[in-house]
Amino acid sequence: MIKYCFTTYYARSATFALVVAGIFLTPAGTEAASSDWVETDGGRIRISALPPSEDGSIQAVLDVELLPGWKTYWRDPGEAGVPPSFRVERSDNIASAEIHFPPPERIRDDYSVWAGYNYPVVFPITLQQATPGKSSVLEADVFLGICKSICIPFQTSFSLEIDPDKPANSFEKRLVKKAYRSLPEEPGNGFEIVESRVNDDGGTLVLSVATPQENDVGELFVTGPQGWRFDTPKLAGRKNNVATYHVSASGISETDTLSGKTVRIVVKAAGRSMETELDLP
C-alpha cells in the first residue's frame, strides 16, 4: 500500500499556503482561455478551454506536467491510489463536467501494482453549459495524487472565464485537440472484445480480445461498479489474433457477482488503444 507523506511543505509563491496532509492551494485565475500554472513538488497543473460550441459543449483539458520520476493515477488505479477528481459545483453556467482518460501504463513500485502515468499527461474534459452561447465562469476543484517514492495528495482550485467571443489561441487549440486525439478509439475492425463471460465463482471475468496483430496480446485495464477492484489481468491463452484473459475482482462479498454488472475495458495493443463498455451476462 502506498504511504502518503504528511509533511509540512513551504510556500514557494503567493498562491501557495502551508498545510499538513497534502498541499491545498488558492484559486488560480485569468481572463484568458488558460489558467495560470499551479506548482507542487513533482510538477505543475493548469486548465485550458476552447470557446463553447453552439450546443453549449466546451472542450477543455487538465494539463498535468510531471517532473522526471514522478507519476499520477488513472481513473481506476487498482491496488492503491485514488483517481483524479474534477468538480465544478461552484461554477457559473456550467451544468456538468466529464473527465476523460488517455490509456494508462501499469506501474510497479515498492508497494503495489497500479494503473497511471509516469510522464506528463493531459486529461480531456467535456463541459456542458446550462445556457448555451453565454459566458461561463469555471470554478474547478481539482484533487489528484502525485507520486515518486511517496505520494503527495494535491488539491487546488481554478477560476477561468470562458467567453464565446474570446477565441482560444493556436497553442490552446492544438493542446486540446491533441488531448482528445489521445483517447482510446471505439471497438471494431479487428480490435474488439469478441467474448465475455463470468466464471462460476461470480468474481472472475473472462475476456477474449481481438488485437490488430497476431503477435501482440495486448494489455487490459478493467473498471467496474463502485466498490469493485480488479486485479492485474492474467493471460490465459492466445489463438491467432485473439487473446483470452482472466480478470479477478476483489473487495466484494461472497454473495455478490459480476453477472449483470457493467464494466469498462481499455485495451492497448500494437501502438493503439481501444475502450468499450460491456454489460455482463
Image (cartoon, rainbow, N blue to C red):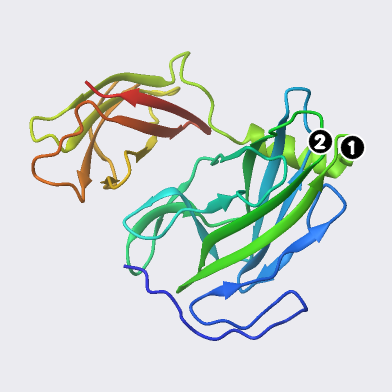
Report which residue position mark 1 lands on: 167
| Closer to us: 165 or 273 | 165
Q: Residue at x 81, y 29 (%)?
A: 133
Please say if the residues under marks 2 and 1 sit with CB atoms less than 8 Å apart.
yes
Q: Secondary structure at mark 2?
A: loop
Q: Which mark is residue 85?
A: none
- List x then y, in percent, for residue 6: 46, 81
- List x then y, in percent, for residue 129: 70, 34
Circle 2: is it few (<14), some (14-19), or many (20+) Cα within 10 Å? many
Q: Say which quarter of the image contains residue 123.
A: top right
Amino acid at the residue labelled 2: Pro
Q: Residue at x 62, y 48 (%)?
A: 88
Above-or-below relation of 83 to 218: below
Chain-order first, disc 2 or disc 1: 2
Left or right relative to 20: residue 62: right
Circle 1: is it few (<14), some (14-19), or many (20+) Cα within 10 Å? some
Report which residue position mark 2 lands on: 51
Above-or-below relation of 107 to 94: below
Q: Is residue 217 visible?
A: no
Q: What is the total number of numbered labels drawn onto the structure image?
A: 2
State the CA–CA distance, disc 2 to disc 1.
6 Å
- List x then y, in percent, for residue 31: 87, 53
- List x then y, in percent, for residue 208: 28, 24
